[in-house]
Image: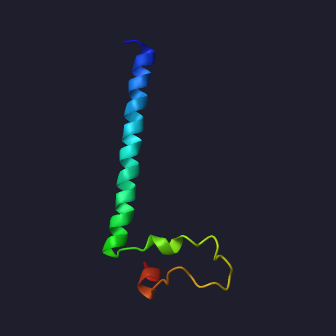
Amino acid sequence: MDIAQLQGYAYFALVVFMVVILYSYIYHLYSSEKKGIKDFEKYGNIALNDEIDDAPVEEISKDEKNK
């Protein structure tokens, strides 16, 4: 086995690993949104609504401020 073949196997393994990570992250986003833990859709317009007088994306409670 020469170095080129070893690099090919390593590249393929890296690509498969990155695809698994990507799909697990997408699954995490959709499942947490479905469970109601966090709504990621409302963060979609955060760059468009960035004026100082715009409403915040989510309110921070006093308990979360103290943490």
Left/right placement of residue 49 relative to residue 28 reads: right
Q: Quadrant of the N terminus?
A: top left
Find residue 2 and report its image quarter.
top left
Classify 66 as above or below 9.
below
User: Measured from the top left, where is residue 23 in percent x and y?
Assistant: 37, 51
Q: Quadrant of residue 10?
A: top left
User: Which residue is located at x 53 percent, y 79 percent?
Assistant: 57
Query: Which quadrant would residue 62 be assigned to in this image?
Result: bottom left
In the displayed structure, 57 sits above or below 18; it is below
Task: Residue 25 in the image: state x and y as whole percent.
Answer: 39, 56
Q: Return the x and y of residue 15 as percentages of the image width and height.
A: 42, 37
Q: Nearer the viewer, residue 26 or 2?
A: 26
Report the number of discs. 0
Q: Residue visible at 37% across and 71% down?
A: 33
Picture quarter with the C terminus: bottom left
Residue 48 vertical position relative to residue 56 in the rendered view, above or below: above
Q: Residue at x 47, y 81 (%)?
A: 65
Q: Residue furthest top?
A: 2
Is 44 rendered above or below residue 52? above
Picture coordinates of residue 30, whole percent (x, y): 37, 65
